[in-house]
Every structure is written in structure tokens, then in C-alpha cells.
Image (spheres, rainbow, N blue to C red):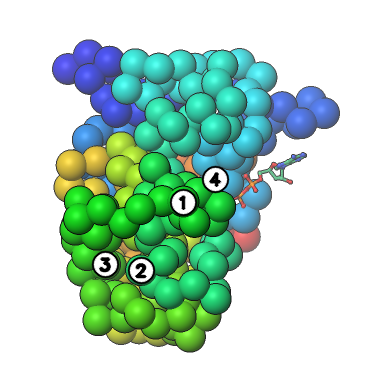
Amino acid sequence: SSTTDFTLSIEGLTVSFDGFKAVDDLNLYIDKNELHVVIGPNGAGKTTVLDLICGKTKSTSGSIKFLNKELTKMSEHAIVRAGVGRKFQTPSIYENLTVLENLEVSYPAGRGVLGSLVFKRSTAVLQKIHEIAAEIMLDDQLDTEAGLLSHGQKQWLEIGMLLIQDPQLLMLDEPVAGMSVKEREQTGELLKKISKGRSVLVIEHDMEFVARIAQKVTVLHQGKILAAGNMEKVQSDPKVIEVYLGH
Ligand code: ADP
């Protein structure tokens, strides 16, 4: 298949910080329905790749094509509107609003707290909220203040706040950090579910979790791809073993 069939096609992506190449001539392709995990040691360039995709960092050269749009020329806001959602490690939920209200203010038409004040709850919006709440396992917590949720539930709520904007690419930075064993399992199932019908790109350190969820793994090292493929292939790659266990 041609590279234009991918949801995300990254080619020759490079960014230099004072001559240091944090990402160096990267090629990365992600399909619809694909759950893709990027791993690699600290400083490998993982966060920088996500920063480049969402427009927070501007590339030195190369291209990022998302649904036939060139993202490298677009602002962060335009990239969000084009359908790219990103979840950071620290959730940006409204602690004093309920779960339902958090989802409601994230709905595109009522985005922002001010918007929600003049935003009329429609049946369609409520239906969507209930649908998402069920997906993120918070359908019995709709009236709970978000600040009272567990650490894991807060992360799920933020995922829900992104899902309600219907992104075609969802990026998550260490989604299970700080979670209990049970929450990790549930998050794994959640990520598998939400990759149906869209693309999901995850940065992760927890290898057990990566093995459980990843369809495709890319190992970054010093801004370049060291290995790529399924977990089995990547795990048995001598270059990967060297980087993780060597020295
Ligand atoms: P990872 O997420 O894999 O740990 P990062 O993408 O955070 O790696 O960083 C890759 C390298 O780029 C590191 O050496 C980091 O210090 C450097 N780097 C990242 N962002 C900047 C920046 N804005 N200015 C200078 N150096 C940066």
C-alpha cells in the first residue's frame, strides 16, 4: 500500500537543538486501528516526537502527514482541530467539576469553561457523554467531583475528555504511570478498545504493559529507530538488548 493510506506518515523528520539532533531522520507510519508504542531509554527522543506531531516543537526538516494534511506547517490549535489529541502525564481535568461536567466542557461545541455556561445540554451531547463515560469505566461516577476520583480514574477521565472531541490520532505519554496493577490492566483494555476506528500512539516505559497492548513497537535510541516490529521481534533484537541491558 502507498504511504498516503496511513493515518500518520512521518518522513525524514529531524529536529536539532543547538546542533544536537534530538530526532534524526525519523520515518514512522501509523495505520487506522493501530496501537503503536514507542519505547527507548531516557533521552531517546520519544517526547520530542510527540511534541513535533502536536506542533509544540517545530521540525528542522522532514514531513508529518496526517490524513493528507502537512502538520509541520500548522499551529498547535489547528493540529488539534485536524483531529490530533494528546494526553500528558499530568491530567488537566477540572477537579471541582463533576465527571459529567468535565466531559461536557470538552465537547467541541462547548469547549472551555466559559463556553459551557452558555451551552445547552442536548440529548445528543448527553448520549455521547454517556457513551464515553461507559467506555472509560466512569458511567457510575458521572455526578462525582473529578477531584475525588482515584489517580487511575482521573487519567481515564482525561482520555474521555479527548475522546469526546473524536480525534483520529490519540497520543498518550506514559498512560499507566502511578497506576495500580488492576488499573494498568483496565487501561490496557481501554487503549485496545479506543484504537478501533482510529490510531493510537503511546510512549511507555513499563515493558510488561507494552507487551500486553502493543501491536507495533518502535524502539528509539539517540533520535533514530533502533528496531521496529512486533514486541517479540523487537525484544529479541540484539541491538535492543544491548541498549537496555548492555554496559
Ligand atoms: P525521551 O522522551 O525519550 O526521554 P526527549 O525527547 O525528552 O527524550 O529528549 C531527547 C533529547 O533532546 C534529550 O537529550 C533532551 O535533553 C533534548 N531536548 C529535548 N527538548 C529540548 C529542547 N527544547 N532544547 C534542547 N534540548 C532538548
Q: Is the distance from the Cβ of mark 4 to the nearest ligand 1 atom less than 8 Å?
A: yes
Q: Are marks 3 and 4 in contact (CB under 8 Å)?
A: no
Q: Residue at x 56, y 52 (%)?
A: 114
Q: Is the distance from the Cβ of mark 3 to the nearest ligand 1 atom less than 8 Å?
A: no
Tag 4 residue:
46
Q: Residue at x 27, y 48 (%)?
A: 35
Say which of marks 3 and 4 sits in front: 3
At label 2, counting other C-alpha atoms closer than 10 Å, the crowd grade (few under 14, some 14-19, many 20 or more) is: many
Say which of marks 1 and 2 sits in front: 1
Image-quadrant location for residue 41: bottom right
Q: Earlier in the sequence, mark 1 or mark 3?
A: 1
Tag 2 residue:
100
Question: Picture coordinates of residue 47 (x, y %)?
Answer: 58, 46
Task: Kindly report the distance in space between the C-alpha atoms of the residues bearing marks 1 and 3.
Answer: 23 Å
Q: Amino acid at mark 1?
A: Val
Task: Kindly report the distance in space between the C-alpha atoms of the residues bearing marks 1 and 2.
Answer: 16 Å
Is 3 or 67 nearer to us in this picture?
Answer: 67
